[in-house]
Amino acid sequence: MTRQERRILVNKIIMLLSTAAALAGMLFLFWIIGVLLYKGFTALNLDIFTYDMAPPGREPSGLRNALVGQLMLVLGASFIGVPVGVLAGTYLSEYGGKKSRLARLIRDISDIMMSTPSIVIGAFVYAILVEPIGHFSGWAGIAALTVMMVPIVLRTTDDMLQLVPGSLREAAIALGAPKYKVIIQVVYRGAKTGMLTGILLSVARIAGETAPLLFTSFSNNFYSTDLTQPIASLTVTMFNYATSPYDDWIDQGWAAALILALFVLGANIIGRLITRTKKGNR
Amino acid sequence: MNRTLDTVFHNTTRFFAISVLIVLAALFFVLFNEAKPAIDAFGLQFITNSKWAPNMDIFGGYPAIYGSIVSTIIAMLIATPVAIGIAIFLSELAPPWIAAVVGMAIELLAAIPSIIYGMWGLFYLAPILRDIWGGNGLGLATAGFVLSIMILPFMAAITRDAMKTTPPILKESAYGMGATRWEVLKDVVIPYVKSGIIGSIILALGRAIGETMAVTFVMGNAHKIPDSIFKPATSIPVTLANEFTEADTDLYYSSLFYLALILLVISFTVIAVAKFWFLRNLQEQRV
């Protein structure tokens, strides 16, 4: 075999291997998606949305309380996390800038916080909000999700605001507008779509969290909207149901998984579409 | 008036920005504070002691630390070559439309909540593995496998992005000299994006080591060092998830916080290394 032939052969082998890797990876990922869709859609029915959890074997049984609880936790965390994250991100981009050491430190710390194990954040909130009060609560769950959400919103806001051209700010300042007005009326407006996408993705991200809720909001088998008490969530219900020995509970766990996955994927796709239309317009 | 509002706005944004630092400091402080009784009782030997006996008030973190590290190593050994293979396929081999579709699918898959990977592992993967290597199909190897699938999309996406940053002119010159695709990859692309790839591997490792839900289902939850990777074990997050609400004595509760603190320190270090040593350049190129 000549050197030339050997080089071509090696190239072919490597390219074949990487195609095989891609196929194998995709195969597993599609297997998981397939299972999720199949099991989820088989178990999904109207009862899931209209009835509360019931003991195993009892009909009708649904996930209404978990859906409502999940919605309250995610919305609660968003109501606190989004404004905090946006304002903090505004500081980094508009007052800190690229050179400020404080801004750079906060950026780095946020990157690290984004990847901090969520169960550690759950333990932290347990120590400050559950243990002293004496019982699990919806508010503790919201606090844990907020801690996870703020760094994400902060970083995307920061990135998006930095994309707004400086000349826009200068033009507004030249007209005599005070800085806060420039930020709110000019910079935010220019970065609107990007910020919206970031917020959407951060909501989707915390919606799938289970670990920090295990010992903060815990779970509740009954319908409850009282955030000072334990509250059910889709993810903790999935965990409890999937590890139970009852078939009907396991099926409902898959239904919950499907609802959650559709929400998360939907938010991601919408987020991408928004950014893409934006780019297309330019 | 405007000046007052300006100051108020400025200070509000600064307050919230600094709150991130305060939360991180509080995280370390609170975990350390709660872990204090266990730290006083066991000291650093906690890390090497493998006996975990809540009924006797003896707590050693080694089984959980061991499980975290071994399952993560297994996951990295499986995921790294596959992720690099996918990235090569996407950036060099696939026709543009396939690369776009597959790339999009991979990014969406990275968003799937990890608990779903755990459920799949428990109900679909574990029974198959049980037939292959016996036992009950749960254990370190299964956990490592599920973890590898979970971090795969994330690693593949970052590696592909890193590869895309290679200036086309470098690749073109190499092709112009008659290099094969593999030679271009090996001698031009990979050296150029080396730090990005290493960074993505370390970042994925950070995720895997702290991951709770993907592994809690399939780890088997046995508080000992198994004699084989195919047997049930535990990890730090799994121990926390399973036992946190059961801790009935102060020392038990405190030992769990000791584990949480160890996990926080490990993941903080891992992520910081990835960010500051390897991904710095990649990020600055992107912004």
Image (spheres, rainbow, N blue to C red):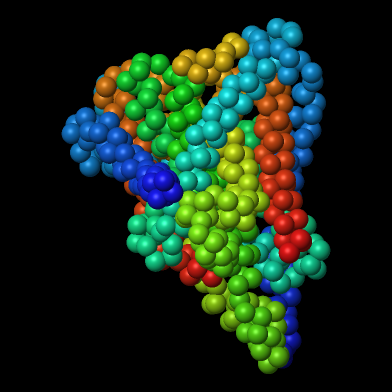
Rendered position, A66 above or below A186: above
Which residue sits at x=32%, y=33%? Answer: B257
Q: Is residue A80 visible?
A: yes
- Indicate the position of residue A68 as horizontal and vertical percent values: 63, 21
Q: Which residue is drawn at the image coordinates 53% and 40% (left, top)? A: A82
Vertically, is A103 above or below B207? Answer: below
Q: Say above or below: B122 vs B87.
A: above
On the image, the x and y values in percent for residue A183 come to 52, 53
Instruction: Name the residue at the top extreme.
Output: A58
Q: Nearer the viewer, residue B32 or A99?
A: A99
Does the rendering let one see residue B210?
no
Residue nearer the viewer, B268 or B221? B268
Image location of residue B239, percent across then percent down:
42, 32
Q: Quadrant of residue B42?
A: top left
* Left or right placement of residue B179 versus residue A216 in this view: right
Q: Quadrant of the C terminus of chain B?
A: bottom right
* Residue beneath the point at 31% across and 36% down: B31
Residue at the (48%, 27%) spot, across then down: A141
